[in-house]
């Protein structure tokens, strides 16, 4: 299974971007997909996730109300709509997937994900 993240770019503060994560070679109908990000000089951190079987969709506190994770089953793709972007959102964004069902408390755990895409750079200028 391969994941391909795209949609990053340079945007001014207050602007919007939509990131896409396309999966090929398999599906995750029983699992979960998440977005993580890593800013320069910082550790990779959780952004948002969802489970295909439903349930709560957790977001990092820093992005709540601004970012929305969604999916398109027909395209086997997951999206991250990012609105009201701030300079502190600047980072490389990664999508990750697990073919296994994850409990809610494990969705933000990077080690729970088996598949990772190559990141896409998001730069927000002030």
Image (cartoon, rainbow, N blue to C red):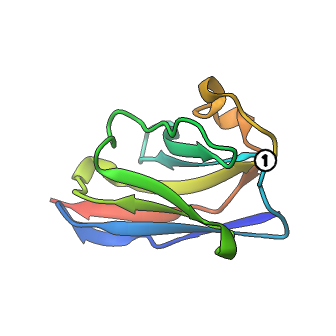
Residue 102 x %, y %: 72, 34
Q: Residue furthest front?
A: 54
In terms of depth relative to the viewer, which is nearer, 42 or 83?
83
Residue 61 x %, y %: 35, 33
Question: Above or below — where is 52 with respect to 15?
Answer: above
Residue occupying image coordinates x 75% and y 46%: 31
Q: Quadrant of the N terminus?
A: bottom right
In terms of depth relative to the viewer, which is nearer, 50 or 47?
50
Q: Residue furthest top?
A: 105
Question: Above or below — where is 79 with respect to 33?
Answer: below
* 67 relative to 1 in the view: left or right: left
* 92 relative to 98 in the view: left or right: left
Residue occupying image coordinates x 26% and y 70%: 11
Q: Residues within 10 Å of mark 1 (few under 14, many from 20)?
A: some
**Residue at mark 1:** 30
How many dots with numbers? 1
Residue 68 x %, y %: 40, 53
Q: Quadrant of the C terminus?
A: bottom left
* Residue 64: quarter of image: top left
Residue 17 x %, y %: 35, 68
Residue occupying image coordinates x 77% and y 55%: 28
Residue occupying image coordinates x 59% and y 37%: 55
SS at circle 1: loop
């Amino acid at each position: 299974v391969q994941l391909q993240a795209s949609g990053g770019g340079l945007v001014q503060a207050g602007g919007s971007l939509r990131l896409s994560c396309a999966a090929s070679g398999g599906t995750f109908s029983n699992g979960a997909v998440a977005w993580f990000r890593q800013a320069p000089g910082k550790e990779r951190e959780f952004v948002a996730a969802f489970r295909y079987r439903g349930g709560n969709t957790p977001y990092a506190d820093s992005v709540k109300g601004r970012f929305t994770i969604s999916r398109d089953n027909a395209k086997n793709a997951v999206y991250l709509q990012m609105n009201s972007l701030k300079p502190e959102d600047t980072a490389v964004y990664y999508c990750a997937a697990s073919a296994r069902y994850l409990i809610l408390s494990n969705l933000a755990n990077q080690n729970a994900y088996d598949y990772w895409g190559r990141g896409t750079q998001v730069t927000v200028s002030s």
